[in-house]
Amino acid sequence: MLLSGGDINTGVPESDMQDAIPDFKGMNLLGYDAMAVGNHEFDNPRDILAMQQSLAEFPFLSANIFDAGTGKHVFEPYTTFDLDGLRIAVVGFTTTDTPKQTSPENVKGLDFQSPVAVASKLIPELEKQADIIIATTHMGHYQNGNHGINAPGDVTLARSVKGIDLIVGGHSQDPLFKPDLQNDTYIVQAQEWGKYVGRADFEYTNGQLTLTRYQLIPVNGSEDDKVIPENQAMLSLLSPYQEKGQQLVEGKVGAVDQRLMGERSEVRFQPTNLGTLLTEALMEKSGADLAVMNGGGIRSSINSGEITYKDVLTVLPFGNTLTTVDMTGKEILAQL
Ligand SMILES: [Zn+2]
């Protein structure tokens, strides 16, 4: 089975400007069986998400997103497979941080409930109809369940709810080179951006599921030198989108004489020259006395030399809105 932890949307300008259509077509060709709904699936208006769902030949799963009005599931909570008589249920869960991490307009009327609370009721039900239960999640893997300011992730789910055999996760962009076994649940994650294909082989004998092999297989573009030849069918499917995307983003917009630092490891923890440039641009645009920007919204560095529209979109992929407020100095200090 081929499963995705979600967040197909946002981050690659050529794809973003084409509503991730190339990604979903590529996933169809790869033969994905199911995908978890990620927070970035809500970066676009809901009609675009609906278009992506109809384009995909696999279900978008989330058992903990409800319509606030009707109390009904907005996505399929789970799907089942029959592999030569072996009954497998795949259930999806989405981080409850989603409404904080995306535009309020796109999650209006949605109720993101606790995955642990939903799973506590749903998993015992699924155990009656399936031999194996897999959760494909977009909640994050946090070492020893220490999720900090983030909503609880896969470790908390596995420790709180018995009966999930495997969690295929995403969101924290964590390369798990060994599965994390918690409460008889294997948790796996293949980092980010298609850098790896995570492969887990299991044996199922007399009701016992045993992990026999687990690998993160590097894909081209990672540090590994072994180059995997391009697949001709995939290349011909995606080339027209790549060409169209390049035309859309190749325009030069400026130049810079030093590297502008936007790496996650720095920009989320301290000011950098890129963060300062961006906030100064916000001040100039708005006429405000100071500007504040979330370091998590700066997604890449810019190298010394010419800057293209693509560079700008890679740094700032979210289409955020600049907002000004009147505050006293005292209020600003309290905020900081
Ligand atoms: Zn995410």
Image (cartoon, rainbow, N blue to C red):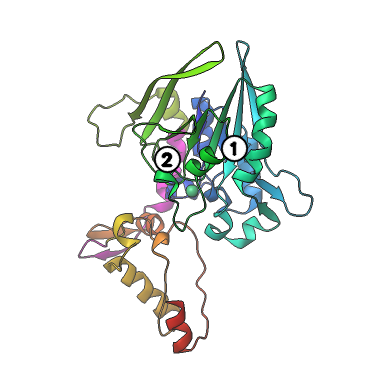
Mark 1 surroundings: few (<14), some (14-19) or many (≥20) residues within 10 A: many
Vertical comparison of 70 with 108: above or below: above
Of the pair 325 and 73, the residue shown nearer to us: 73
Q: How far apart are the alpha carbons under marks 1 and 2?
A: 30 Å
Q: Quadrant of residue 315?
A: bottom left
The disc placed on residue 65 is: none
Residue drawn at x 26%, y 64% as measured from the top left: 255
Q: Relative to residue 12, is residue 321 drawn left or right?
A: right
Q: Is residue 227 above or below residue 260?
A: above
Residue under circle 1?
92
Q: Which mark is residue 242?
A: 2
Residue displayed at 56% across by 15% down? 207
Residue at the image point whose x is 36% and y is 70% from the top: 278
Amino acid type, mark 2:
Gln
- Looking at the rendering, the stretch of residues picked out in magenta corresponds to 238-260
| SS assignment at label 1 | strand
Q: How far across and down, in percent of the image, does residue 44 sit?
A: 58, 53
